[in-house]
Image: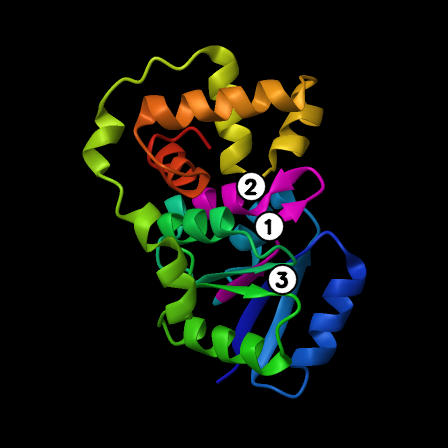
């Protein structure tokens, strides 16, 4: 039985490479999307059995698309495919219900195994990946019910943190200094009662800030 896959990546060379990697398998790429907007449209049009999706894309964040797709298609398996080994991405992906996370540098066998598990309705997460974010995912859910007095700027910084941006990238994005970003990050962690950026990202996801 053919397994229909939608691939979402803003780089054509990656999409071409994926077609070549999967051509001798029982997986059929039924569609491609180069943006999150295209991905949302293609899901409705094609009804794929699974999705392989990039995270950092021009014009949108794959993790946001993951969350939006899951609202209407809770059972649709989505595997994230990224060049960035970022624990914040992994934590957000787990929190949003992704079936797995595969680095673009991983061997072909790892990608195929992850997709086969996803198609079977099973988890493609490795023990190591889950171990890295266990502390973040264990942060008390009750804390999301408490109104935290973040300033507008702190909220902006937190959203960028949850998107996986570094302090340097946040400074450039918001047009403020690196030192100012560092101060905001310290204030945010203290205010929401977490110890690192990954926990802050999970808190932001549960608070629907990203």
Residue 58 lies in magenta, yes or no?
A: yes
The residue that label 1 is drawn on is: 55
Front of the two marks 1 and 2: 2
Disc 3 element: strand
Residue drawn at 80 percent across, 63 percent down: 13
Which residue occupies the foreground of this view, 28 or 123?
A: 123
Q: Is residue 63 left or right of residue 205?
A: right
Residue 133 lies, with reference to residue 189, above or below; the image says below
Q: Measured from the top left, where is residue 117 in percent x and y?
A: 42, 76
SS type, badge 1 = loop
Q: Nearer the viewer, mark 3 or mark 2?
A: 2
Q: Earlier in the sequence, mark 3 or mark 2?
A: 3
Q: Please say if the residues under marks 1 and 3 sit with CB atoms less than 8 Å apart.
A: no
Magenta span covers which residues? Answer: 50-69
Residue 153, visible in the rendered structure? yes
Query: Pointer 3: what residue?
Result: 7
Q: Residue furthest bottom?
A: 24
Q: In the picture provided, is 60 more to the left or to the right than 183?
A: right
Magenta segment includes 83: no
In the rendered image, residue 116, in percent from the top left (x then y), is placed at 47, 78
Residue under label 2, please give it. Answer: 164
Whole-percent x and y of residue 103? 59, 65
Q: CA distance from mark 3 to mark 2?
A: 22 Å
């Amino acid at each position: 039985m053919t397994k229909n896959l939608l691939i979402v990546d803003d780089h054509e060379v990656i999409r071409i490479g994926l077609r070549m990697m999967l051509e001798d398998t029982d997986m059929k790429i039924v569609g491609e999307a180069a943006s999150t907007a295209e991905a949302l449209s293609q899901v409705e049009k094609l009804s794929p059995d699974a999705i392989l999706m990039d995270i950092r894309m021009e014009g949108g964040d794959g993790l946001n698309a993951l969350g939006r797709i899951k609202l209407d298609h809770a059972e649709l398996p989505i595997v994230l495919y990224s060049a960035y080994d970022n624990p914040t991405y992994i934590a957000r992906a787990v929190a949003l219900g992704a079936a797995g996370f595969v680095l673009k540098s991983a061997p072909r066998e790892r990608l195929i195994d992850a997709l086969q598990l996803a198609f079977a309705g099973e988890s493609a997460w490795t023990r190591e990946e889950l171990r890295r974010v266990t502390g973040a995912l264990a942060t008390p859910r009750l804390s999301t019910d408490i109104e935290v007095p973040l300033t507008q700027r702190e909220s902006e910084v937190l959203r960028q943190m949850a998107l996986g941006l570094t302090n340097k990238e946040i400074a450039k994005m918001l047009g403020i200094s690196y030192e100012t970003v560092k101060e905001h990050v310290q204030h945010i962690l203290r205010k929401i009662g977490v110890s690192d950026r990954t926990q802050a990202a999970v808190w932001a996801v549960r608070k629907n800030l990203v």
